[in-house]
Amino acid sequence: MTITRLVLPGPGPAACDVASLCARLELLYAAGAGAVLCDAGAVTAPGLGTVEVLARLRLTAGDRPFRVTGAAPALRALLDLVGLVELLGEAEEREPPGGVQEGVEPDDLPV
C-alpha cells in the first residue's frame, strides 16, 4: 500500500483552507495513494478552523485510510475535546482499541 503525506499549513489551517486541502486529498487518492498521513507538525495554533479542516478531510477520505500525525499537545487536546481524537489513531479515553472485545461475566447484569 502506498502511503502519502498531506501537510497542513501552520500555524493553523483555517476554514478557508478546506476546499483546497480536500481537493488535494482527492488528487492524492486518485493518483494511487493507498493511505494518507496528514502531517500536522506545523500546526502550532490550532483552533476551530483546524477542527473543521480535519473533520472535512476525514469525510473526504471516506472509507479510505486517513490518519493525522505530528499533532502537538494543544491539537491533541482540542481533538479530544470535540470527539475527533480517533483521527490520531488512538483509542478514546474509556474506549477499548479497535478490534478488542470486552469480556462478559455470567453474573453481569444486563444494561
Image: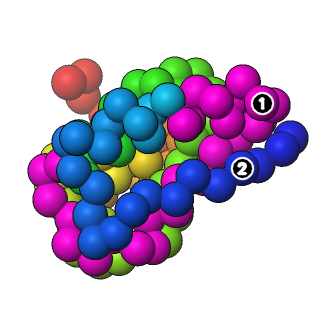
* Residue in the picture at 25% in, 22% down: 110
Q: Quadrant of the C terminus?
A: top left
Determine if the magenta segment contains residue 39.
Answer: yes
What residue sits right under mark 2 in the picture? Answer: 4
* Residue in the picture at 81% in, 31% down: 32
Asked where in the image residue 53 lies, by quadrant, the reply is top left
Nearer to the camera, 89 or 41: 41
Tell me: residue 55, above or below residue 37. Answer: above
What segment is highlighted magenta in the picture? 24-49
Q: How many angstroms separate mark 2 from mark 1 (CA)?
A: 10 Å
Say which amino acid is labelled 2: Thr
Query: Do the CB atoms of the residues marked 2 and 1 lie less than 8 Å apart?
Result: yes
What residue sits right under mark 1 in the picture? Answer: 31
| Image x and y of residue 102, in percent | 47, 41
* Residue in the picture at 52% in, 59% down: 7
Q: Tag 1's secondary structure?
A: loop
Task: Kindly tell me whether residue 83 is visible in this rendering.
Answer: no
Asked if residue 32 lies left or right of residue 67, the reply is right
Asked if residue 28 lies left or right of residue 111, the reply is right
